[in-house]
Image (cartoon, rainbow, N blue to C red):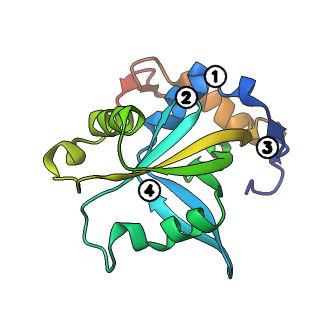
Amino acid sequence: MPGPGKRGKDDDRRGMDELTDSLRRRLNAVRVARLATLSEAGPALVPICFVLLDTTVYHVLDAKPKRVDPASLRRVRNLQRDPRAAVIVDHYEEDWDRLWFVSLEGSARILSRGSESARALTALKRKYPQYRRMALPEPALVIALDVGAVRRWRVRPGPASAGAAREARRVGRSGSTRSRSTGRRSGR
């Protein structure tokens, strides 16, 4: 949430035309997201590793230790009962002028075989080196969330965030900042 005096861009539902290549790159650069499913008792959240391909978010049920068989996990049971789900991808910093989140909402499918599953696993292995070293279960269960709505929020620069805007202008392409007192650049 923005602090006092900061304005946030209103939450709103956006169509698929908002899932631009630029937004896809930003989302795919994030390492962890949260998958929200619906249980009979209410929402259930779990952190996930993911990849966004076209308009579908993929998450594999990997070989990390679990208390139950992957097919019996609560997220799988929830999706079998009600396929509505969302993935929240967010960015947090102590500088609240840089906060943002994107909610990808839609209907989920559970894949275990086929070319779509293989494509998702290849992309996940490309993004996460841990998956290249990990023996995934055969067949690996992949959750595929077909995105039907995109909800975005970020702090919009306003009077209270003018300092952050000045700081952003001082940051060079190399990721360094120029000291106000010496004029020298320092790495970040």
Q: How busy is the neighbourhood of tag 3: few (under 14 within 10 Å), some, or many (20 plus)?
A: some
Q: Earlier in the sequence, mark 4 or mark 3?
A: 4
Of all residues, the one furthest to the top in this rendering is 173
- Estimate the spatial distance between the alpha carbons at disc 1 and disc 4, rounded to whole Å: 22 Å
Q: Is residue 122 above or below residue 134?
A: above
Q: Earlier in the sequence, mark 1 or mark 4?
A: 1
In the image, which is nearer the foreground, mark 3 or mark 2?
2
Residue 24: which numbered mark, if any?
2
Q: Is residue 155 left or right of residue 80?
A: right
Q: Is residue 174 left or right of residue 80?
A: left
Q: Position of residue 80 (x, y in %)?
A: 57, 64
Q: Position of residue 16 (x, y in %)?
A: 72, 29
Q: Position of residue 8 (x, y in %)?
A: 80, 45
Q: How busy is the neighbourhood of tag 4: few (under 14 within 10 Å), some, or many (20 plus)?
A: some
Residue at mark 3: 160
- Estimate the spatial distance between the alpha carbons at disc 1 and disc 2, rounded to whole Å: 6 Å
